[in-house]
Amino acid sequence: MPLMSSLKILGLGAAFITVGLKGLDWLLALHHRPGRGSRQPLNEVLFFPSLPACVEHLYNPDRSHSCACPLPHGLNTSFTKLLEHLLSACVSLDICLFSFSNTELSRAVLLLHSRGVRVRVLTDRNYMAITGSQIGILRKAGICVRHELVITMHMHHKFALLDGRKLITGSLNWTLTAIQSNKENVIVTEEPELVRPYEREFNNLWKANDPAKHLP
Amino acid sequence: MPLMSSLKILGLGAAFITVGLKGLDWLLALHHRPGRGSRQPLNEVLFFPSLPACVEHLYNPDRSHSCACPLPHGLNTSFTKLLEHLLSACVSLDICLFSFSNTELSRAVLLLHSRGVRVRVLTDRNYMAITGSQIGILRKAGICVRHELVITMHMHHKFALLDGRKLITGSLNWTLTAIQSNKENVIVTEEPELVRPYEREFNNLWKANDPAKHLP
């Protein structure tokens, strides 16, 4: 009888382990299923034009109540989301932009630079000098800027890499017209299969357009 | 003894089931792990400029050996990959483009239309009429084209949706300069979190720019 009892316990024990392990698997699968799980990388799409809105609270979270500008306050627009993502950079910001004239985005880049974030900017040779371009202002602030050294083509990218893990890319040039008037799209993603190729592209272009390599 | 034997068999059976189920789970997890599994959606990035190459085999797979054009044959470039993705549409193709002048991409769209794929094209009001634009050719072939009916802004998107499940989007306008000369990027993805918003955007713009709604 003791032997029979032991075997009964062994049988029941194994059956409970089976059910227990399956249950654990189901719970884990439920937790990690696409769209819900903590493992699912960020994938967000922003469409423009964006409504004008006050963005002061994004630069100064402590003094957000004190802004008296005439723009609507507290709106969560595509532009506030874009700016919020940009300001989330902690370590590095690599920007590869055809055209950069928006003063709010420029202010955000300058703020990140002043916080010690390593900022690198790659831009188009011709468009960097147009009226309203922010490139000169970024350079004066000490931010490292490189431009395409080959004249015959456009550097038409419009992407930014934050901390080497978040990618912002799309049709949107960083201009006021694009943000407030055009139909535009921006993807914000942390999907490694998308982030890594852009990281390689930035590093390749950064090296290829090193002015030291192109001295006369 | 027969009872004891039955219990032994029950115990061993339960243990085997436990090990068997865990083994099956591991095999399934291995098969579906990110980057390998059939569940992982397509995420591909193409960079331009692309080397010129013969693409005849993509239109006529059976007569690929017969092309005598002077372009390099058998190259797998960013452009051949883009064209291959485009030609993979079976049911529907929704294109939302600022500028469309590339004749190879136009030929692919016309081929899909002739195969019975439902093609819809949304484009910018001003750029649809520039020299070399393919919009008139698509319209003459019977493809449904709509353009932005509001004059003050650009329809600056550059994306295409294939069969409602594959998205092609990036900085690339469908022009020869963009493909062969500019630094450009294109994402090809089947990630539902990215595809669905673009699908909604296309349908919203398609409805908003219905000429019947804007009759004088």
Image (cartoon, coloured by chain):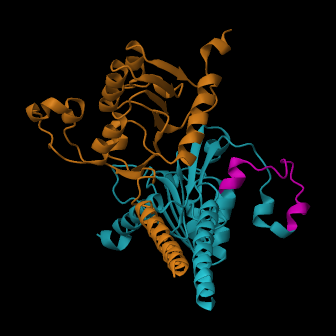
Chain colours: A orange, B cyan
Q: Magenta residues, as a range?
A: B63-82
The part of the image, by quadrant, that contains residue B135 is: bottom right
Image position of A82 with respect to B191: above or below: above
Residue B171 x %, y % = 52, 45
Residue that appears at 86% across and 63% down: B64
Which quarter of the rendering shows the C terminus of chain B?
A: bottom left
Which residue is located at x 65 percent, y 60 percent?
B85
Residue B77, magenta (yes or no):
yes
Is B66 part of what is drawn in magenta? yes
| Of A213 and A22, the residue lying toward us | A22
Residue A106: which quarter of the image? top left
Looking at the image, the residue that sits furthest to the front is A1
The quarter of the image holding the N terminus of chain B is bottom right
Classify residue A83 by image quadrant. top left
Q: Nearer the viewer, residue B97 or A87?
A: A87
Identified at 47% across, 35% down, the residue is A161
Question: Does residue A64 lie above or below B155 as drawn?
Answer: above
Does residue A149 appear to the left or right of A18 in the view shown?
Answer: right
Q: Nearer the viewer, residue A196 or B70?
A: A196
Q: Residue at x 11, y 32 (%)?
A: A67
Residue B5 horizontal/vertical position (percent): 63, 85
